[in-house]
Image (tube, grey):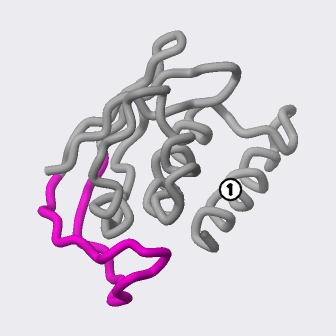
Amino acid sequence: MRVCLGLLFSALILAGCGKATEGKLTETDEVVASVACLNDLAMDEKSFQGAFVAGTAPKNRAAYFSSAIEVTGSPVISGDGATVTVKISQGNSSTEGVKNIKVAKIGSGEVTWKLKKEENSWKIQDAPLP
């Protein structure tokens, strides 16, 4: 959670540096933040479900909790849709049973995730794992 808060705080600071949009995140920043914080949100079922377009959250929440998620490159945004390339690898958490989630073994590689903007918020629509 600290990583996500740090990312959002950094994005707010950078968004205000030399721009007229002081303190506002760009669409790109919002998409990146929606993806980068998913493993922290996976600690809680309600938060995990809330990160996704209704009805699209994967059943294997533990795999996302156990993942290191890194956005590579810039998201491609078109209207209310976006795609982003994400590098997935095994997270470094060695804790078993945090919030009743066991650490899952996952594969590593790059995948493309799809997002959709709903009610001024970017939600993940499709988040395959390698």
Q: Secondary structure at mark 1?
A: helix
Q: Is residue 66 left or right of residue 115?
A: left
Q: Is residue 81 left or right of residue 61?
A: right
- Of 125 and 85, nearer the camera is 125
Residue at (32% x, 69% y) in the render:
66
Q: Residue reaching furthest top?
A: 79
The crowding category of the residue bearing disc 1, from other C-alpha atoms within 10 Å (few below 14, some 14 to 19, many at least 20), is many
- Of 129 and 20, nearer the camera is 129
Measuring from the top left, give residue 106's x and y in whole percent.
17, 65
Q: Is residue 77 left or right of residue 30?
A: left
Measuring from the top left, give residue 109's x and y in whole percent.
15, 55
Q: Is residue 109 above or below residue 3?
A: above
Residue 107 lies within the magenta run = yes
- Of 12 and 93, nearer the camera is 93
Position of the N terminus by quadrant: bottom right
Residue at (54% x, 44% y) in the render:
34
Circle 1 is placed at which residue position? Answer: 8
Quadrant of the image occupied by residue 94 = bottom left
Task: Point out the stretch of residues depicted in magenta.
Answer: 86-109
